[in-house]
Image (spheres, helix red, strand yellow):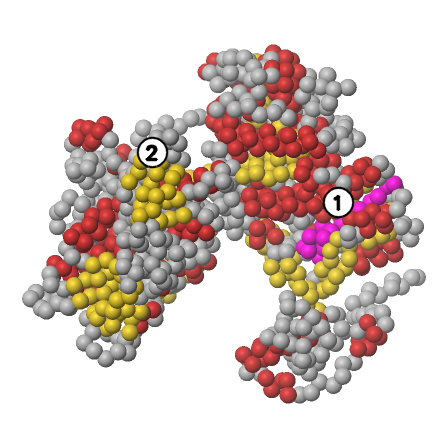
Amino acid sequence: MAERPLHIVAYCCHYCAYAAADLAGVLRLRYPAETRIVELPCTGRLDPLEVLHAFEHGADGVMVAGCLEGDCHFRAGNLNARRRVGRIQELLSRVGLEPGRIEMVNMSSAMGRQFADAAARITEQIRALGPSPLYPPIHATAAAPDGAPPS
Amino acid sequence: AKEAVMAREHDPETSVHVFMMDMRAFSKGYEAYYQRAREQYGIQYTRCRISALREDPESHDLFVRYASGQWPGASGEKELTTDHSPLTTDSFDLVVLSVGMEISEPVRRLGRDLGVELDDYGFCHTALFQPLETSRPGIYAAGPFREPKDIPESVIDASGAAAAASALLAPSRGRLARFVEYPPERAITQEEPRLGVFVCHCGSNIAGFLDVPDVTAYASHLPGVVHADHLLYACSQDSTATIQRRIAEHNLNRVVVASCTPLTHAPLFQDVLRQAGLNEFLLTMANIRNQCSWVHSEDRQAATAKAKDLVRMAVARTVTLEPLTRQTVAVAEAALVIGGGPAGMTACLTLADQGYAVHLVEREPKLGGNLRHIHTLLPPSDGSPAPDPQRLLADLEGRVTAHPRITLHLEAEVEDVHGFVGNFTSRIRRTNQPDDSIGHSVLVVAVGAQEYRGPEYGYGTDARILTQQEFEARLSSTADGSRGPRRVVMIQCVGPAEQTCARTCCATALKNALRLKDLHPASEVVVLYRDMRTYGFKERLYTQARSRGVVFMRYDEDHKPHVDVSRQGPGVRVTAWDGASGETMAIDADLVVLSMPMVPSEGSRHLATTLKVPVDADGWFLEAHVKLRPVEFANSGIYLAGAAHYPKLLDESLAQAQAAASRAATILARPTLSSGGVVAMVNEAACVGCLTCVRVCPLGIPVVDAARVGIGGTMGTAYIEPTICQGCGTCVGECPAGAIELLHYRHHQVEQQVMSLFAEPAVGEAR
Amino acid sequence: MIIAEQKPFEEIKGLLGEAEKVLVVGCGTCVTVCFAGGEKEAGILATSLRMATRIDGQPKDVTHQTVQRQCEWEYIDPLAESVRQADIVLSLGCGIGVQALAERFPEAIVVPGLNTSFLGLPTEQGVWEERCAACGSCILGLTGGICPIARCAKQLLNGPCGGSQDGRCEIGHDTPCAWQLIYDRLKAQNRLHLLLEIQPAKNWSTSRDGGPRRITREDLRLAAEVSE
């Protein structure tokens, strides 16, 4: 059987990283096709519980991309995100996943090249770690994980 | 320094050597950057003039010859210092010339065609008191066209020039505006999700690299989707009309557009939804162009599979979307300006001239601020005589006092400020009078700065040791024909300025030195300096001062001058180490003038706390973004002008005041403000009142309100005012009770989008 | 407020043993505020356990619920059905919460997920310090509002010991000497005379030394209804 393609979730902040990813497109840069961008208003919105749920459901890797430090549109959202990514790495290692499956990167909206490079590098890093042992998820549907509040 | 640091960041192996005459790191944070460049990035700086640059014919390396070395006692490690030491030759791979800005020929031509006065170098001439006005009424100039300058000052100029122009246009404001009428919004919350998915070809931009019809067919089978279609250009007029028609035909209540990026096109498709009677928040765009077809153009199969994933994720998210309302808040008609110096008064007049009511609060009994201490100005670059600053003061004061739309509050201070952009209420405490309460929609902080008065170099112990401000006052009261001082020593970079450059002291010292030379040509002036930071056109003063015989002696931080006040004698003995000769010299001076830096005004930290706006480590008010938002705070509706931001020369303060007024007018010009939408909302039934959101919010918006009852009947839960929340979601990420939701990015909305990625086989897998 | 912290993950896994259905119960009061056992931490622990046990090859079915306060019968009663279905209950409440669950649900196996640490306050976001030892007879009125029982390593009553150096306690440089704090504060308030009075040896019977404590307020107890 062919190797399973990877699932890499890229949480990108609206003002910088998402725009940098757009710019990478404008510049026609190429990077591996495994990343799936999820836009957040700011990486400060990153919720460790949501990220863990993504891993629980089989994410092979997570990239968190925020503004350059000191340049957050909301002053310090990216610094809060960096702190939370550190905690998630600890949580991953205690459950038996490699902490290298999540990484935070910082870039400005003008850094399309850096986005493409980071996406390529992190994809390679995840590829080296191999697919997550948690895929496919036990609940194959996209049902709300527990703890998610009703709408 | 920036290019050097970037070269090092790009390749840490690169060694970078900067040759310079003086380091002009004059503005906010520049000095710290220069220090980081030296200490953290190991960039080497050498003061010299390069005497030769030539290429090695064989290796093609470049040889730079310069005088280098160090004198006994000099601190060689941090900076090499010398002028006359032996020549050194180094080789480099690349030499970058740091050349000055100049005006290009087409711009000169433009200036001539517009009929505005240009100087010999082609820079546009503007008056000191009207820094953004050209010689021709109705034409304004901004940015390096006036004088070489950095991005923040250029952005400030541009906003200020816009304010000047809009004062002229004030009578016709809004006359050309037309308002779009939307049909009433359909209530959809009770309906089952009925999604329409529209996949865009974007000509061949998307369709050339992935299979659009296949993605469309796939989308049509996703849960909740009742209609899927593909369009050649989704953003074209006939396509948007089609989308509108399909919404009506299929009774769609949510829409996914799979096309380019929402950063450019979300407003357009949101408008389509509104035209069709749907709330604008019921749209998701799947970015299958910038983030898919354009970056995976080499692999059609992978691009198609990824586009399907992105559409599936967008559909999963869209099913969960809910309509959000923006609230409209009436905008109070007045502005509040704090500080009655030149910046504050200019901000007032700029706003009042545009037709807005302004309250000006000044804590002193008289207007004027630091302008009261300025008696002479730098001569303008065109060589005309310097205008009289006291005339400007009288003019500003007269206009402010007489202006029918300006209300003056003298001997008054702002005590507290409640509310938010569009609707602030401030309590003004007045001396000997009851407190006053003012309603206003915007607030401009123009509280200025004050001259530092510390004990350095014996200040305060001897009447012959003065500050530049005191010296300037003495010069201005000098009677004609009086005897001048035999010798004056000026010491630069005093006290706090040893650590951070205070920007204005060099120019002030030169101004006063030249003024002294005008009054008493026989007086000797010795300036002890570390770097002369005469930026822009101020460089001419430096040249002028040297040609008029002002003596400049460079010292470094390890060899500070010493002022001996105890010694008996006719003058004050100043002992100074001279960087050019390496010798220590004793100078007896009639007067020692200390270039005391400007420091933040007393009470500015208190005001910052009152307004909940940030100050930096030194106490300067901190703008929202150094380059992009230089005159406003991150907190909406609060603006910043003048030396409260950082020490500034008069024309810079005036330009910044106009800029702040310009930005403030963008609020005042509107009858209502719309806010809300993507904002954080507390679920009181889950909140424990732990204060985490209060502490983590970058804007200090959440409060714990004792009147609200939380989980288990605890007293006090968090409340986040939706009209001022900026929607970053930091509180959501941090809340330990999971009690805060960011609307449009609710937990289940983000999770559904992510989880749907794992619900189906991924890229390339057999389906 | 009660300050607690989560037990090491391995220890928690050990406590769960072979149980397959695990109910994690969070608490919405003190332990939420100190980021040890609120809704979010309960969710994080639940998903972590699900992941870890799947990776270990013995997947457990872990769910979580958070109640307002684990130390009130009324708040924990609604858990009855979930508790009944679970093989084991992992309480993220303080020691009181764990025991409340155990007492209310006699058949359930209840294990603690937290170590209940002390009574204290957050001195800044992310830093908690002990302030009270619940000794049962408060002397803060004599010591300038600074407790030598909770904050002096030796629980001294009449001034510092010889281990007080530069205002720091000899047990660790991060610990201020409580008696230095008391002295500085009373001096600033011109109340040093309070320290001249020698405090007799403390009566510890109101503390833990007197055995488990109980407070009964007859004025608050509801009268038993009189039956006909």
Q: Which residue lies at the image location 58% right of the left edge and 77% below the top edge? A: C185
Q: Residue furthest left?
A: B481
Q: Secondary structure at mark 1?
A: helix
In what quadrant of the picture does the N terminus of chain C appear?
A: bottom right
Q: Residue at x 23, y 58 (%)?
A: B552
Q: Depth-wise, is mark 2 or mark 1 nearer the camera? A: 2
Quadrant housing residue B457: bottom left
Q: Residue at x 28, y 63 (%)?
A: B583
Tell me the kind of residue under disc 2.
Glu
Task: Say yes or no: labels 2 and 1 on the same chain.
Answer: no
User: Residue B403: x percent and y percent?
Assistant: 23, 51
Please determine whether, in this image, residue B522 is positioned above or below residue B746: below
- Residue B55 is marked as 2
Percent x, y for residue B704? Answer: 59, 54
Q: Which mark is residue C57?
A: none
- In the image, residue A65 sits, relative to residue B318, either above or below, namely below
| Residue picked out by circle 1 | A94
Q: Is residue B157 visible?
A: no
The three-letter amino acid code for the residue at tag 1 is Arg
The reply, left or right, for residue B192 in relation to residue B176 is right
Secondary structure beneath disc 2?
strand
Left or right of C122, for residue B458? left
Tell me the distance, in whole angstroms, between the alpha carbons under discs 2 and 1: 59 Å
On whether residue C29 falls in the magenta region, the answer is yes
Q: Is residue B87 above or below residue B745?
A: below
The front one of A121 and B236 is A121
